Amino acid sequence: AQSVAQPEDQVNVAEGNPLTVKCTYSVSGNPYLFWYVQYPNRGLQFLLKYITGDNLVKGSYGFEAEFNKSQTSFHLKKPSALVSDSALYFCAVRVPTDSWGKLQFGAGTQVVVTP
Amino acid sequence: NAGVTQTPKFQVLKTGQSMTLQCAQDMNHEYMSWYRQDPGMGLRLIHYSVGAGITDQGEVPNGYNVSRSTTEDFPLRLLSAAPSQTSVYFCASSLTGTNNSPLHFGNGTRLTVT
């Protein structure tokens, strides 16, 4: 069975400081990994994905994520956070050999960026 | 571009009532799915479809039915609502044929069952 964990319910950061949102996964085989962001009263929006290749993936709005196979992690990062980055962030994993619909989401991490 | 459209945005039901949550997409996506979002539990897959006429169960299918008669529409039916089905429901779609296509989400339906 595949699973994904986001160990922090909430991350607080001051505007201009680096932002990190943690994600670890447990799957058999090589994973496809995704980050999504949810603003209040909206659906999730795709940020970035790791399929294969470079371990550092760049995505939308200045976000990037680092895939670490030995630590089974896929942490989301942004060098300088903005107040507008305050939102709920979800990590998700899919196994290529699994059925098409099996995208597993983490519980989400609330990011609060203070001015 | 409309993307994924969900209706209604809000709904209150009494226990035992039935209703259908509507979902439509205009991107010609083969794959469509329904998730429910509950606090502290992330999103859980209810049902999904890889094309017209094909549906399959996700992680939490009990109490829900789906059908896919067209590429564009993927309604979710609650036959006899229960308080445990109080949740926010999201429809999502993506291209099929590749496992790395990102999902496009609707803005959700907030359902309360009393």
Image: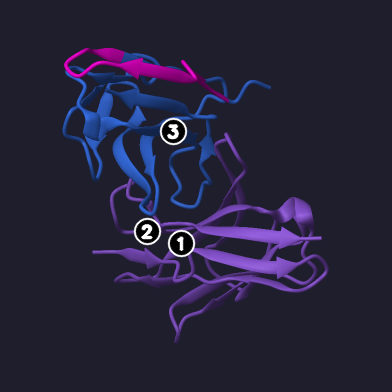
Chain colours: A purple, B blue
Mark 2 residue element: loop
Could you tell me if residue A2 is visible in this image? Answer: yes
Q: Secondary structure at mark 1?
A: strand
Q: Which residue is the extreme one toward the bottom? A: A70
Query: Residue B108: horizontal and vertical position, in percent?
Result: 49, 29
Q: Chain of mark 3?
A: B
Residue B68: image location, x then y, percent: 32, 19
> In the rendered structure, are the residues bearing label 2 and label 1 in contact, judged by CB atoms less than 8 Å apart?
yes
Residue under label 3, please give it: B90
Q: Which mark is residue A32?
A: 1
Q: Which chain does the residue under circle 2 lie in? A: A
Image quadrant in which you'd find residue A64: bottom right
Q: Secondary structure at mark 3?
A: strand
Is residue B23 shown to the viewer in this render?
A: no
In what quadrant of the picture does the C terminus of chain B appear?
A: top left
- Mark 1 and mark 3 residues within 8 Å of each other at the beta carbon: no
Of the 4 image quadrants, the one containing the N terminus of chain B is top right
Q: Is residue B76 above or below residue A4?
A: above
B18 or A74: nearer the viewer: B18
How busy is the neighbourhood of tag 3: few (under 14 within 10 Å), some, or many (20 plus)?
A: many
Q: Is residue B64 left or right of residue A20?
A: left
The verdict on residue B17 being magenta is: yes
Taking the spot 66% from the left edge, 59% from the top edge, the residue there is A112
Percent x, y for residue A42? 58, 35
Read off the magenta span: B4-19
Mark 2 vs 1, N-terminal side: 1
Q: Is residue A81 above or below residue B27?
A: below
Residue visible at 40% across and 67% down in the picture: A5
Of tags 3 and 2, which is closer to the observer? Answer: 3
Q: Quadrant of residue A66?
A: bottom right
- A61, above or below A66, in the image: above
Residue at horizontal 24%, vertical 20%? B78
